[in-house]
Image (cartoon, rainbow, N blue to C red):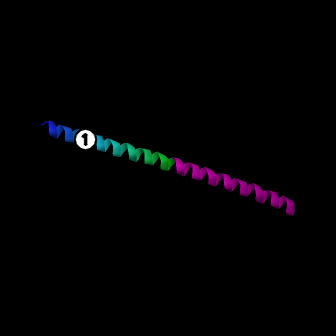
Amino acid sequence: MLKANELELKLAATQLQTRSFKFINAKIYALSVTSAHFIFARISYINFLASNVLAQVVK
């Protein structure tokens, strides 16, 4: 009886670790996507400004 309970506890602990690991991975992925989007938005904005400045100079 005790052995079966021990096994169940170990299994439950393993499942919890796997779940929290997946959750942490999901958070890291979300953060990396957010920062990548932020960097892309910045680059787009800089390109927009540069093209505006160039257009002004050409005029």
Quadrant assignment, res 40: bottom right
Q: Is residue 29 magenta?
A: no
Q: Secondary structure at mark 1?
A: helix
- Tell me what residue is drawn at x 82 percent, y 61 percent: 55
Hey, what amino acid is under mark 1? Answer: Lys
The quadrant of the rendering that contains the N terminus is: top left
Residue 28 x, y percent position in the rendering: 48, 47
- Tell me what residue is drawn at x 63 percent, y 52 percent: 39
Task: Please give left or right for residue 35 compared with residue 59 in the image.
Answer: left
The quadrant of the rendering that contains the C terminus is: bottom right
Task: Please give left or right for residue 29 compared with residue 11 in the image.
Answer: right
Task: Please give left or right for residue 37 compared with residue 8 in the image.
Answer: right
Quadrant assignment, res 10: top left
- Tell me what residue is drawn at x 81 percent, y 57 percent: 53
Magenta segment, principal secondary structure? helix
Q: Nearer the viewer, residue 37 or 12?
A: 12
Q: Single out the residue that lies furthest toward the bottom.
A: 58
Residue 49 x, y percent position in the rendering: 76, 55
Q: Is residue 50 magenta?
A: yes
Residue 2 x, y percent position in the rendering: 15, 36
Task: Please give left or right for residue 13 compared with residue 56 in the image.
Answer: left
Q: How many marks?
A: 1
Q: Single out the residue that lies furthest toward the left.
A: 1
Residue denoted by label 1: 10
Mark 1 surroundings: few (<14), some (14-19) or many (≥20) residues within 10 A: few
Q: Is residue 2 above or below residue 41?
A: above
Which residues, given as a range, are shown in magenta? 31-59
Residue 45 x, y percent position in the rendering: 70, 53
Q: Nearer the viewer, residue 4 or 24?
A: 4
Q: Single out the residue that lies furthest toward the top.
A: 2
